């Protein structure tokens, strides 16, 4: 994973548009806000295409009621598994209606928690595979190596707009698209076959 710092990203954006630090048309505070927006959007795109890049697993959760707290950094749920003997088994998502009448073990999200139903089967040990959200305050843009260029180019496009260099905006956006296209198959070979999250064996 690339570990592009905020300060280095600002320098690279200014280099890309031929400016230096202190540019009043495109100050560092504006650059950083745009970098953060592009980074979060890119992470969501990567999470949708290659979920295991930002996947994490919770610690084991023992519950008698089936109420499971979501991890504090959870952006979206991938898989919920219940332990049975020496194995883990995924449970289904409950329908949005008639949750109280489901026959098999399933779950639904409610606020900061997950609720397992039906109550008669809810007790047990669980673990949650989830997509981790970026930190509230981003200081490092952690994306697969090479894709940091997308963050730079899309932010540079905004810089061109602020300088009224509209003929250059398309160049930066096309460069960002080129970087994605060239990296895609490599990411697919590395992460694309990992759609099934987790293992069916308990951890030692």
Image: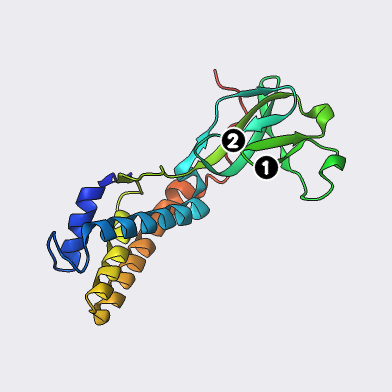
Residue 40 position within the rendered picture, expressed as x and y whole percent measured from the top left = 41, 53
Counting labels gives: 2
Indicate left or right for 37 with 8 as reference: right
Indicate left or right for 94 with 47 as reference: right
Residue 57 position within the rendered picture, expressed as x and y whole percent measured from the top left = 53, 33
Decide which of 173, 17 is in the foreground and name it. Answer: 17
Residue 168 position within the rendered picture, expressed as x and y whole percent measured from the top left = 24, 77
The structure residue drawn at horizontal position 31% and vertical position 77%, both measured from the top left corner, is 170
Mark 2 or 1 closer to N-term?
Answer: 2
| Residue picked out by circle 1 | 109
The kind of secondary structure element at disc 1 is strand
The kind of secondary structure element at disc 2 is loop
The structure residue drawn at horizontal position 44% and vertical position 50%, both measured from the top left corner, is 189
Circles 2, 1 touching at the beta carbon (< 8 Å): yes
Q: Residue furthest bottom?
A: 167
Disc 2 packing (10 Å; few <14; some 14–19; many ≥20): many
The structure residue drawn at horizontal position 46% and vertical position 47%, both measured from the top left corner, is 191
* Circle number at residue 84: none
Indicate left or right for 115 with 51 as reference: right
């Amino acid at each position: 994973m690339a570990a592009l710092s905020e300060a280095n990203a600002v320098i690279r954006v200014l280099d890309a548009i031929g400016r230096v630090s202190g540019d009043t048309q495109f100050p560092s505070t504006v650059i950083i806000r745009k970098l953060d927006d592009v980074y979060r959007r890119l992470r969501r795109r990567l999470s949708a295409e290659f979920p295991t890049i930002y996947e994490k697993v919770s610690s084991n959760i023992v519950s008698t009621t089936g109420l499971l707290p979501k991890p504090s950094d959870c952006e979206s749920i991938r898989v919920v598994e219940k332990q049975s003997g020496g194995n883990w088994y995924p449970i289904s998502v409950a329908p949005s209606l008639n949750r109280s009448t489901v026959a098999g073990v399933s779950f639904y999200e409610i606020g900061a928690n997950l609720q397992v139903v039906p109550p008669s089967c809810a007790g047990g040990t669980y673990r949650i595979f989830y997509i981790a959200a970026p930190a509230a305050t981003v200081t490092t843009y952690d994306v697969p190596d090479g894709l940091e260029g997308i963050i730079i180019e899309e932010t540079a496009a905004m810089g061109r707009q602020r300088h009224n260099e509209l003929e250059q905006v398309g160049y930066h956006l096309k460069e960002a698209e080129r970087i994605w296209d060239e990296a895609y198959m490599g990411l697919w070979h590395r992460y694309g076959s990992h759609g099934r999250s987790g293992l069916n064996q308990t951890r030692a």
